[in-house]
Image: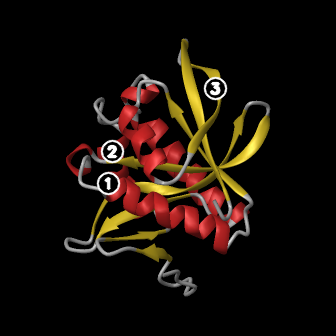
Amino acid sequence: MFYERQWLMMIFETERLYAREMTISDLGALAQILQDPHVMYAYEHPFSDEETLNWLNRQLERYKDFGHGLWGLVLKETDEMIGQCGLTYQNFAGKSVLEIGYLLRKDAWHQGYAIEAAREAKNYAFEKLKADEVYSIIRDTNISSMNVAIRNGMTISGREIRHSYGVDMPHYGFTIRKNE
């Protein structure tokens, strides 16, 4: 189910979660995610306060510029933000692609929340944005995220090396086309 009422900032809901635009008041919850070294292992480092604020500001700009970005994932039962999932434009294999991204707090891992949200993000991309194809770009060591992409009907379509923080990081591009 998709929400059009802007005052709610809600994008979609699942049985256990809802996604909504983040606001500056989510900075603390976001810091719990982005500053956890276990969560950020695929990024090679936990974020600083400044990097966390920049990340949030980038999402707020994406909402304004594109109408979407990474949204806050909120657990309905407790009304707390446990992660992010959404759609951003990323470069992969020399082209700009629409990516489904997801990142959850460590205590929310292995409970099915990522696939629950990723499926709705995929539906949003195809139904609301009329995208023909979506990607998930995943570091080669992130087996859990690869499994989410596979469960979301995606297959590997390419591989590239990304250079970040002085480290070469191989990434796979998982894709699915509309109506697959």
The residue indicated by pointer 1 is 29
The residue indicated by pointer 2 is 33
Write down the quadrant of residue 177 in the picture. Answer: bottom right
Q: Quadrant of the C terminus?
A: bottom right
x, y percentage for residue 44?
A: 42, 22
Residue at (71, 62) in percent of width and height? 66
Q: Amino acid at mark 1?
A: Ala
> Can you tell which of label 2 and label 3 is closer to the viewer?
3
x, y percentage for residue 169?
A: 54, 19
x, y percentage for residue 176?
A: 63, 51
Residue ranking furthest to the right: 95
Which mark is first along the chain, 3 or 2?
A: 2
> How many numbered marks does the figure carry?
3
- 91 and 141: which is toward the camera: 141
Residue at (64, 65) in percent of width and height? 125
Residue 83 visible in the current orientation? no
Would residue 42 be found to the left or right of residue 155 on screen? Answer: left
| Real-space CA distance between mark 2 and mark 1, rounded to the nearest whole angstrom | 7 Å
The residue indicated by pointer 3 is 159
- 81 and 57: which is toward the camera: 81
